[in-house]
Amino acid sequence: MNNLAERAAPRPWLVLALLLAAALVAMALFMTLNARGSWDFVLPFRGRKLWALVLVAYAIAVSTVLFQTVTENRILTPAIMGFDFLYQFVQTGLVFILGGFAYATLDPMLRFGGDVLVMVGLATLLFRWLFGTGARSLHLLVLVGIVFGVLFRSLSGLMQRLIDPNEFVVLQDALFASFNTVPPELLLVATGLIVAASLIALPLLSRLDVLLLGRDTATNLGVDHRRTVALVLVVVAVLISVSTALVGPVLFFGLLVANLAYLAMPGYRHIEVLPAAVLIGVVGLVGGQAGPEHVFGYNTALAIIIEFVGGVTFLVLLLRKAPR
Amino acid sequence: MANGLKLAAAALGVLVLAAVSLFIGVSDVSLASLLSSAPDDRPVQVLLISRIPRTIALVLAGMALSVAGLIMQMLARNRFVEPSTAGTVESASLGLLTVTLLAPDMPLMGKMLVAALFALAGTALFMQLLRAVPLRSALVVPLVGIMLGGVIWAVTQFFAYRFDLLQTLGAWTIGDFSGVIRGRYELLWLAAALTLVAYVAADRFTVAGLGEAFTTNLGLNYRRVLTLGLSIVALVTAVVVVTAGSIPFLGLIVPNLVSAVMGDNMRRSIPWIALTGAAMVLVCDIIGRVIRFPYEIPIGTVFGVVGSAIFLWLLLRRREQLG
């Protein structure tokens, strides 16, 4: 299989260079398309948006690929497992418990950090519960994940209606940050978290390649499976928190990006797949945002299109062959 | 006749819940205020115009959706199928959106029928998909349905977004009975009639669930039974979506809970399923009205929590049995 894969993609670095070029073109288009007025205003304004988009693309792509490696499949993603909604649930829960005023007056760093910490704990618990006790049907996990998503969303909805309208306004600010209104300090915190998560993940990459051989083989080869999975989960939870805080739940984007990256990099090595996934994510998100926003004049359409294409992809993946 | 007695007791329980539902609300309606006021006074009018229609709507919707879920489960031969995991609800919403855009002046009945046609088409597409693929696991079936629903939903959202109807779309997806008053729920009687038809035809659905060859062998027209069943499901879904909005997973969990206690004799369990469904909807609506009094929480949100929690329990419990 490895020989075949290497024949199919003889020069992974060439593919990466092409993807990088495409990503750069998309970014350039995003910065300059239809720019009217003073560059002093346009460049910082769009620069912030671009920064947020790149962060989100990075977070979603990396978290999905890592999660799929750990769970040994190509269908399950953190978003489909309801992790995005779990993050919103954590935020709502904190406002619910602390009260809107206390939550709003917390230092943004501390607040975001608290959200992320609770998120890491809950995600790890959920993961241990579902994946901890041996082999399990993949379909069951997907279905359970989807229903968990509904549960978290409904619980958040319920709590949002239970809290005071004034406190709800606080929450709304936290939940519905859009690219146009991302505050600079949130961007800084998000960048810091992503760098930290990446630093944890970087030394794991070669071990993750071994993990692709399956749990038993990996253990046999000397990989501490439990520890590696726990670390990866922390990274995934942090990345999901960042992306959800910046754009809200995005159900299928990770699935699309990860599977495109596997197609582009049939060598399966993380050092190749991860950059490819990130670059594809940037092309998709920045290019997609530059396209609809400037050409058609609206941007919600992007989320809807992703949902449509992602849903069809998921159906095809589900029905085409027995998933691993 | 122990079953008959138990059934009567359960019906009495539903009646008690319905009575409780009648007397909850901001406006003062109690036995005392009803007796002491004239027919044109506020308490009587509130009772007649708002409370009674709402309670009836709750009972009818709960019964009809639960039985519709059971029919789908028989026909698709899968325990985890129901209108919201088969693309039916999303298709009905798409139909409703289409008719709202193209013929906004059409009477409610006409809109409902268009929505039902779309729901039927969507459900038929789902059944066709199931036939086309060799299935490896029973859990693939609801997954396919949920994803198909997601795709149809994306299309619906796209048009709603283009024509500024996203908010209206929200009203169809999150079930809410607070807007139900006299003159705005009567379509649900149609759903009740369909539930009765389902009861009469129960044995046919059981047979159809055993497969086309088997059904034909017994002298039944398989396609006709299938069409009848899917039409009932589509019409019930459309009626509920039009009048109150969808209630996720209701049709899934009620038949499963009843079958866990009673087994799978469909004709015997249909009355139980109808009563349990009505009771569940009543209880969740009452919770939604009491938990943040005097404000209301839509039943779709309350049931989203209750329903998905029970669904999870069903899924994970089943696994432990297998393992």
Image (cartoon, coloured by chain):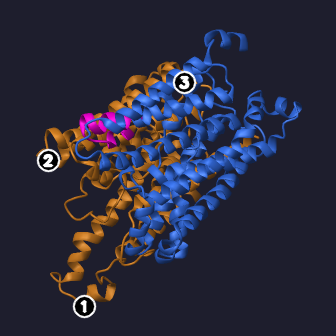
Question: Which residue has dot 1 on it?
Answer: B36
Q: Position of residue B233 (x, y in %)?
A: 38, 40
Q: Is residue B45 visible?
A: yes
A222 vs A247: above or below: above
Q: Is residue B271 visible?
A: no
Q: Which amino acid lies under the numbered mark 2 shown in the image of this protein? A: Pro
Q: Position of residue B109 (x, y in %)?
A: 19, 46
Of circles 1 and 2, which is in front?
Answer: 2
Image: magenta residue range: A287-307
Q: Which mark is residue B242?
A: none
Q: Which amino acid lies under the numbered mark 1 shown in the image of this protein? A: Ser
Tell me if A312 is positioned left or right of A35 in this view: right
Q: Which mark is residue A319?
A: 3
Q: Please give the chain letter of the residue carrying mark 2.
A: B
Q: Which amino acid lies under the numbered mark 3 shown in the image of this protein? A: Leu
Of circles 3 and 1, which is in front?
Answer: 3
Letter of the chain shown blue in the rendering: A
Position of the N terminus of chain B, as image quadrant, is: bottom right
Using the image as rendered, state which of residue B189 and residue B216 is in the foreground.
Answer: B189
* Mark 2 neighbour class, 10 Å CA radius: few under 14, some 14 to 19, many 20 or more: few
